[in-house]
Image (tube, rainbow, N blue to C red):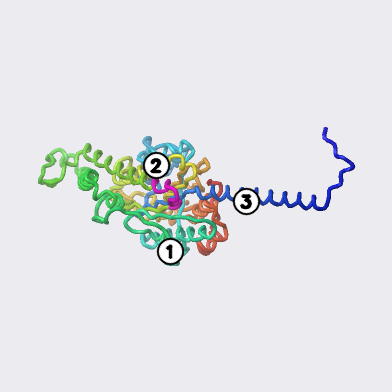
Amino acid sequence: MNRINPEFRPSRRGVLAAAGAIGLSLQFMATQSFAASEGAQEKKKFIFVICRGGMDGLTVSPPVGDPDYAGLRGQIALHDEALKLDGVHALHPALAATYALAKAGEARIVPAVATPDRARSHFEAQDVLESGSPVVYGAASGWLNRTVESLGRIRKVNALSVGPTTPLVLRGKATFESWSPGKVVDGSARLPTLLQDLYKSDPVLGPALARGLATEAMAQEAMTNVARMTPAQAAVMPAATPAMTGSAAPAATPGAVRAYQQQGQDAARKLGETLAGFMREPGGPQIAALSLDGFDTHANEGAAQGQLAARLSYLDAVLDGVHQGLGPDWKDTVVVVATEFGRTARVNGTGGTDHGTASTALLLGGALKPGGIVGDWPTLRSASLFENRDLAPTLDMRGLFKGVLGDHLGVERAALDTTIFPDSAAAQPAPRLV
């Protein structure tokens, strides 16, 4: 047993020296701890994906266990083919890679989320989604740019815009890089504009995607026309001829449609992998934003197959490419997928859905905490529908973003409430996301 020598009397110089040594030691440990924390924060990555057009959340994450779902959705309702998440919610079968991440605890759905805007106008809703303002045209910059600016006062943060044009969400005072290898192509094309832009100059994928646009469009039109025929008309319908389909275009057979959709998925996956590659580079961006078009489904939306299913397969491939491309960095990553508004709860007379209110957002990443749905489920009972037509929102989109930016990137609450999302103190951050 160690004993203290009763004769020992430390000198004043010795006490001061010891105190100095302890002070230096504490200072060193604090510096090291701060540096380690700072280094950990610098590894955090955040990607924001905007699905433009008003993505139908009730098809992205069909509430197949809700007793009112099938009746409201009619011909576009999903049934046994839906990928079950719990007793109520599922994912669309085109989101197979996202579903695998959900089963691994690395993806979650936010099934009833909306911005403060209720106008159901694409332009206004996208402005509110990206500016972070509670009112239309209330800010000239985007909330993600202001996030970069806020974090830049603490540490170096690089951001990247992917695509032919920079979305509003990343425009502002803070500097960022942009990447797009081609030029914008025909806006009437059916694949998301970004994928066309990316692969226009590709000698293999470019022509294949161009052919696929025409093939997919013809297939959708043909299926719609056949669905409207009487049995007698269908019995005498002639086989497709070059004059009917266009001499330069391939026949719109199911096999051809699947082949060209696969080309689109390959292109989308390559896009995700390329973005991930940028983010893995030393000194590469920690924050990125990209937008995908084509989610406005007023007619012929489809169910397990069809127009929206094709879009979701491309989205799923982009997300899969990001996941695979990030490799070990996936554990430090959060991806948020959101849209400007959802669609009506009821299917319309043309097999589609009209502009609505709440929709589904997707959360993915190795940094996520495993869990069930984010936010509450309002149900599809008539009394619960917003204005008797739309899924009612139970979570403010700004609260979702605040939860990720605060817990994952370390953005201060005061900045979130006042600068990044002006006048938003009432929008509480979604808890326990990362």
Badge 2 marks a residue whose secondary structure is helix
Judge from the rendering whether residue 368 lies leftward or rightward of residue 323; answer left or right. Answer: right
- Residue 246: horizontal and vertical position, in percent? 13, 47
Residue position marked by numbered label 3 in the rendering: 31
What amino acid is at disc 3? Thr
Q: Earlier in the sequence, mark 1 or mark 2?
A: 1
Q: Cα distance, mark 2 to mark 3?
A: 34 Å
What amino acid is at disc 1? Gly
Q: How many marks?
A: 3
Q: Are marks 1 and 3 in contact (CB under 8 Å)?
A: no
| Residue nearest the viewer, comparing 217 with 275 | 275
Quarter-of-image position of residue 64:
top left
Residue position marked by numbered label 1 in the rendering: 172
Badge 1 marks a residue whose secondary structure is loop
What amino acid is at disc 2? Gly
Mark 3 surroundings within 10 Å by alpha-carbon count, few (fewer than 14), some (14 through 19), many (20 or more): few
Q: Earlier in the sequence, mark 1 or mark 3?
A: 3
Please state, as top left, top right, bottom left or bottom right, where the N terminus lies in the image: top right
Up-down relation of residue 75 to residue 171 (above or below): above
| Residue nearest the viewer, comparing 56 with 123 | 123
Badge 3 marks a residue whose secondary structure is helix
- Residue 65: horizontal and vertical position, in percent? 44, 39
Instruction: Give, as a single range, the part of the protein colored magenta.
Output: 276-287
